[in-house]
């Protein structure tokens, strides 16, 4: 974990910004990486945005603006006039341009599209058809594409002409005359082979599983890149025409975003985090994302209270039961949360196919039984050994041993039930095509609170003869 | 999320394995990606491992074995004799070889080291000095290294000789005569420049922040690759000598592993998941990872029970309090869990520097106040409107309005307190150099259960005059 978010050149830049020294700003910013520039920009008071952007100009600003959270993009672009925006949009790769246009409102989107050259405009419009979170929405169309019928020399000449236009030359894709993806070569295969070698002879095949449909979810694309250790993944349409590619850096971002989303969902936090960081988001944004679950779960928790009310008599007869009540109830929430977390993570890493539900349940059932039994036995032993020292009131005919056995039985039953509920809920959610990660751990906790109350008081009534 | 974990060629392979048809196994496996091969191997009964490995031979097995979970590696290697192991280890890149040797026991490690050639053995021993989870433990030393004093032609000749030995040529690093890292060039810069161009003229600088110390945590390296959109990150020693590099595919794996670890820790699941998938881990492994927290939290929960016992009289006087007890207590756990999740995730994404504690606390305090007030008001309103219809017993002098106000006040106080506790605990953990992610959400839940009981009964005593 990095301990410092501000690097020394960033501090110099901040000083230059405070002094409004345009030439110093330009010279410091020009030597910095756009990721660092974007961080400085985000931490700046908004009155300084104007001088920052004017000083660095549209060329440097272009890459920096791509790195900003979606909510800050439109404001940043507003500091430039039409002529400068033309330059800025020309600087951007096609997928970055699309990302930016997806982040702004409808009116500015149309206005910005009008600033692009006719070719860029057509390409951008066609890319805007894909949803932001699909492979097509993430792909770049700037990549090295060569024909199988070329020789190495023809390919190099072709790429040299096209050099400006390609985002990565580390992997080059080979298509047939009709644009179908048929193979790939590496730049080194060109550099280290004689000039008359036919591309067809040196290309490697691209397996049917090492490509992704433009309409597929972005997470599927990222998982393929991860699984097959790829630098780039080709994106195709349903007829296998090569449309674009997704690069390793997009894949890393996608995986981080999806992990964050999963983690937040499981804590009962809803909605898109977009690209805003924790500190950038307003209190109101955080509030909206957290209140829904909090309120729903509060209402649900009244069910637990209702069960407790119903068992008023039982509790009155043996008030000592209340000493163990939170433990029995909470252990269910804890173990249910563990089970659901494990199952949800395994699902999002693609480890659990749809056929594995019964294997998961069998595993969690045994696990729940082991956890429940050991926990029950331990707590019962501690109870029988320690409790008598405090001389608590027990009704006639109820021994410490019987009381300990009651707590143990209820605890075991609660842990087994909760483990299975925790494992089953995400599987059930997926079966009805809901997102398993949306089965938040707090929801499971609250749910098994209710079952825990019922189990505890029912077992107590039965075993203690109340 | 992929719906199928087995692809059609994998099914063919499984059939060939069942028929023990060695030549079919070899021909199908030879055309498959090692990631897919490894998955088939992991899902196979262990009696079939022998025929699988013998059929594919050490060359194909090498890359497959690297992909196996650590716990399966030693057994897989045991199927080969010394001669075949020599071939297998020669096939591996140096970082993969080190990974494998780190996964096996001390005795086989020494035996395997003896099978390497003298040069490989020395290199491997020097890499084994770095911990597995550091940049040095993850780096490869097979990379393109050229000298600033070379021309393009000399560099190409040098790389051509060394071609076998380099894992990626997409980025080449430039060192000075004493091995200090001073720049990088891309293969395309060589391919598209005239042969007499000096490397010094075409190389790009590598900023001081775009390199990582060999002793740094692997997560730091992965975050740098992510931040700067790099394909490879150079690894240096404290004198800035270039030692190796970390590739984008390692970075993706590191980020996934760390996310999984964070997610599991926050659910109270301890220990290394290693590289085993959910279904591969035995029930006993899962049991060990879950029991510790479960047991500790169960003991802690007795504190809540103790508080409840102490307030027996209060509860007896107004048993209606029990209807809202789970809600007040659970709302604290939910909101505390949300706060800690947000803060921990922001920390592991590097968004919160050490100086931001007060900003986080201020944000969560306002957030807790908003959540608590709105939640309290809503629940009070519902209570005052609906409760009278059920004609519950209230002590003399306690109106529905007063009762509703009591619940609301306790709920608000509990939510504010818990939100701050949830945000402060991970910050505190980091301040005393503990892993913030180890502050598991269930621990926070159990902790604020206790505070919730105290708050609820104290507020009730005060406002209801009990």
Image: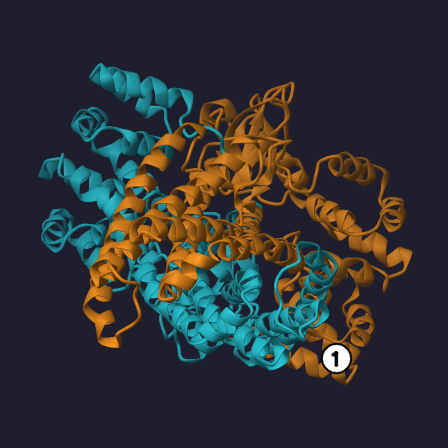
Chain colours: A orange, B cyan
**Spot occupied by residue A281 in the image (x, y as percentages of width and height):** 69, 65
Secondary structure category for the residue under label 1: helix
| Residue B462 sits above or below residue A97 on the image | below
Image coordinates of residue B464 in percent, x first then y, are 62, 77
The C terminus of chain B sits in image quarter? bottom right
- Label 1 CA crowd tier, 10 Å (few <14, some 14–19, many 20+): some
Q: Nearer the viewer, residue B100 or B187?
A: B100
> In front here: B280 or B89?
B280
Percent from the top left, x then y, of residue A31?
64, 70
Q: Looking at the picture, how far across and down is residue A273, in whole percent?
A: 65, 56
Residue A53 at least partly seen: yes
Classify residue A262 as left or right of residue A131. Answer: left
Residue at image point 49% right, 40% down: A426
Q: Quadrant of residue A114?
A: top right
What's the residue at 21%, 51% (across, down)?
B101
Q: Residue at x 45, y 79 (%)?
A: B431
Q: Which residue is mark 1?
A: A17
Instruction: State the residue in front, B395 or A310.
Output: B395
Left/right of residue B12 with respect to residue A297 in the rendered view: left
Left/right of residue B195 with respect to residue B300 in the rendered view: right
């Amino acid at each position: 974990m990095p301990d410092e978010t501000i690097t020394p050149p960033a501090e110099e830049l901040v000083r230059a910004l405070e002094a409004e020294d345009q030439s110093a700003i330009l010279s410091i910013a020009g030597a910095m990486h756009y990721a660092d520039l974007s961080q400085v920009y985000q931490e700046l008071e908004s009155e300084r945005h104007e001088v920052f952007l004017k000083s660095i100009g549209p060329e440097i600003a272009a890459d920096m603006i791509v790195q900003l959270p979606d909510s800050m993009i439109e404001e940043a672009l507003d500091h430039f006039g039409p002529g400068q925006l033309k330059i800025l949009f020309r600087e951007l790769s096609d997928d970055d341009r699309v990302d930016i246009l997806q982040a702004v409102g409808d009116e500015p989107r149309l206005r910005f599209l009008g600033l692009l050259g006719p070719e860029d405009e057509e390409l951008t419009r066609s890319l805007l058809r894909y949803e932001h979170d699909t492979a097509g929405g993430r792909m770049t169309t700037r990549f090295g594409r060569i024909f199988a019928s070329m020789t190495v020399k023809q390919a190099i000449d072709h790429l040299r002409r096209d050099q400006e236009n390609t985002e990565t030359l580390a992997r080059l894709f080979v298509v047939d005359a009709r644009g179908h993806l048929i193979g790939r070569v590496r730049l080194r295969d060109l550099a280290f082979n004689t000039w008359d070698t036919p591309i067809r002879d040196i290309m490697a095949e691209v397996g049917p599983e090492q490509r992704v449909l433009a309409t597929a979810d972005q997470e599927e694309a990222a998982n393929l890149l991860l699984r097959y250790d790829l630098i780039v993944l080709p994106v195709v349409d349903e007829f296998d025409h090569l449309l674009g590619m997704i690069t390793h850096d997009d894949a890393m971002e996608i995986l981080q975003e999806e992990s964050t989303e999963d983690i937040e969902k499981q804590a009962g936090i809803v909605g898109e985090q977009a690209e805003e960081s924790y500190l950038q988001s307003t209190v109101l944004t955080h509030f909206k994302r957290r209140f829904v679950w909090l309120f729903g779960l509060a209402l649900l928790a009244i069910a637990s209270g209702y069960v407790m009310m119903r068992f008023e008599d039982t509790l009155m007869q043996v008030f000592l039961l209340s000493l163990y009540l939170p433990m029995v109830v909470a252990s269910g929430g804890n173990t249910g949360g563990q089970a659901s977390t494990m199952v949800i993570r395994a699902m999002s890493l693609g480890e659990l196919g749809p056929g594995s539900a019964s294997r998961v349940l069998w595993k969690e059932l045994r696990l729940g039984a082991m956890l429940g039994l050991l926990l029950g036995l331990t707590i019962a032993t501690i109870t029988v050994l320690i409790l008598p020292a405090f001389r608590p009131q027990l009704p006639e005919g109820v021994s410490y041993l019987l009381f300990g056995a009651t707590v143990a039985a209820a605890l075991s039953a609660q842990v087994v039930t909760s483990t299975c509920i925790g494992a089953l809920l995400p599987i059930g959610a997926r079966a009805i095509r809901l997102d398993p990660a949306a089965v938040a751990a707090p929801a499971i906790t609250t749910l098994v609170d209710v079952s825990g109350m019922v189990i505890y008081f029912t077992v107590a009534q039965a075993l203690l003869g109340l």
